Amino acid sequence: MIGMLRQMITCRWTARRIQRYLDADPAAPLTPGEITRLEEHVAGCARCREAVRQHRSMHRALSLWQGRRPVDPDVVDRLGAVLTDLSEGRRP
């Protein structure tokens, strides 16, 4: 029971930092300790590993759109809602 609770807490902690980790955002950098903790968790957690895969796929897809045509703001809002749902463990 305690192990499951610890896993849930770590998943939530990781979900809140995945985007910053993948973007390597200089405005909001993760500490070396946070990076190690996140990478260790993702290596052992299929759910968080899938979230990383989805974020990377989304990034690749969005990078293909650059310069082609404007993105509909409503689509961006819906995409943000889906990512929030995923990071909070809800199905979109």
Image: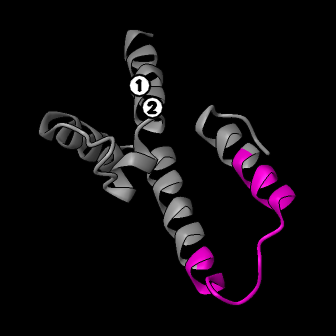
- Magenta segment includes 23: no
**Which residue bears the numbered disc 1?**
7
The quadrant where residue 69 appears:
bottom right
Residue shown at 25% from the left, 40% from the top: 30
Q: Which mark is residue 11?
A: 2
Q: Between 13 and 1, which is closer to the camera in this rendering?
A: 13
On the image, the x and y values in percent for residue 79 come to 74, 55
Q: Between 65 and 70, which is closer to the camera in this rendering?
A: 70
User: Range of the magenta residues?
Assistant: 61-80
On the image, the x and y values in percent for residue 31 come to 18, 37
How would you rate the neighbour count of disc 2 (Cα within 10 Å): few for under 14, some for 14-19, many for 20 or more? many
Q: Is residue 62 above or below residue 87?
A: below
The quadrant where residue 81 appears:
top right
Count of numbered tags: 2
Q: Are marks 1 and 2 in contact (CB under 8 Å)?
A: yes
Amino acid type at circle 2 is: Cys
Most common SS among magenta residues = helix
Q: Secondary structure at mark 2?
A: helix
Residue shown at 56% from the left, 61% from the top: 54
Q: Is residue 65 above or below residue 54?
A: below
The quadrant in which the N terminus is found is top left
On the image, the x and y values in percent for residue 40 come to 24, 43
